[in-house]
Amino acid sequence: MDALTVLALAAFGSTAYLTTLATVQWLNQQASRAKVAGLVVVGMVLCALIGTIANASGSVVIGFVVGAGITPPVHRWISQRPRPVAGH
């Protein structure tokens, strides 16, 4: 297993998660028809992406799963941290 491949795909899995999250949050603010069509497109893209990754080597799959698995709790932790007040 190539460690560099696992690390690179972990970053890609993290990016895929954050991009999907931002897209779905944006779609939730749109009109009903656009929301449904957008969610269908997002689902199709994710299925194609996961299918392509599943067809690749084992280290690629492991890296993608690790990146996508670690990102949600880390993203929640970063979002919930208190922010320092500027100028004080």
Image (tube, rainbow, N blue to C red):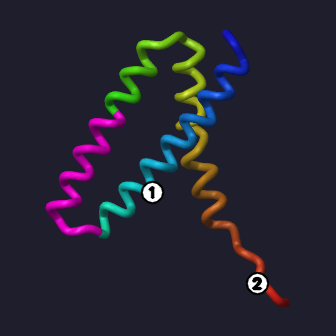
| Separation (CA) of disc 1 from disc 2 | 26 Å
* Type of amino acid at the residue the image marks with label 1: Ala
Taking depth in this image into account, of 50 and 79 the one nearest to the observer is 50
Q: Is residue 62 left or right of residue 41?
A: right
Q: Is residue 22 magenta?
A: no
Which residue, given by chain and number where applicable, does mark 1 sit on?
A: 22
Label 1's element? helix
Q: Is residue 88 left or right of residue 37?
A: right
Residue at the spot 70% in from the left edge and 73% down from the top edge: 82
Residue at the spot 77% in from the left edge and 78% down from the top edge: 84
Residue at the spot 14% in from the left edge and 61% down from the top edge: 33
The number of callouts visible is: 2
Furthest residue toward bottom: 88
Q: Quadrant of residue 69?
A: top right
Which residue, given by chain and number where applicable, does mark 2 sit on?
A: 85
Place of residue 71 in the rendered image (x, y in percent of width and height, measured from the top left): 58, 44
Please give the range of residues in magenta. Answer: 30-46
Q: Is residue 42 above or below residue 58?
A: below
Place of residue 46 in the rendered image (x, y in percent of width and height, measured from the top left): 36, 36
* Type of amino acid at the residue the image marks with label 2: Val
Q: Is residue 3 left or right of residue 42?
A: right
Taking depth in this image into account, of 78 and 5 the one nearest to the observer is 5
Quadrant position of the C terminus in the picture: bottom right
Q: Is residue 72 left or right of residue 49?
A: right
Q: Is residue 17 above or below residue 47?
A: below
Mainly helix, strand or loop, the magenta region? Answer: helix
Question: How many neighbours does mark 2 have within 10 angstroms: few (below 14), some (14-19), or many (20 or more)?
Answer: few
Q: Quadrant of residue 79?
A: bottom right
Label 2's element? loop
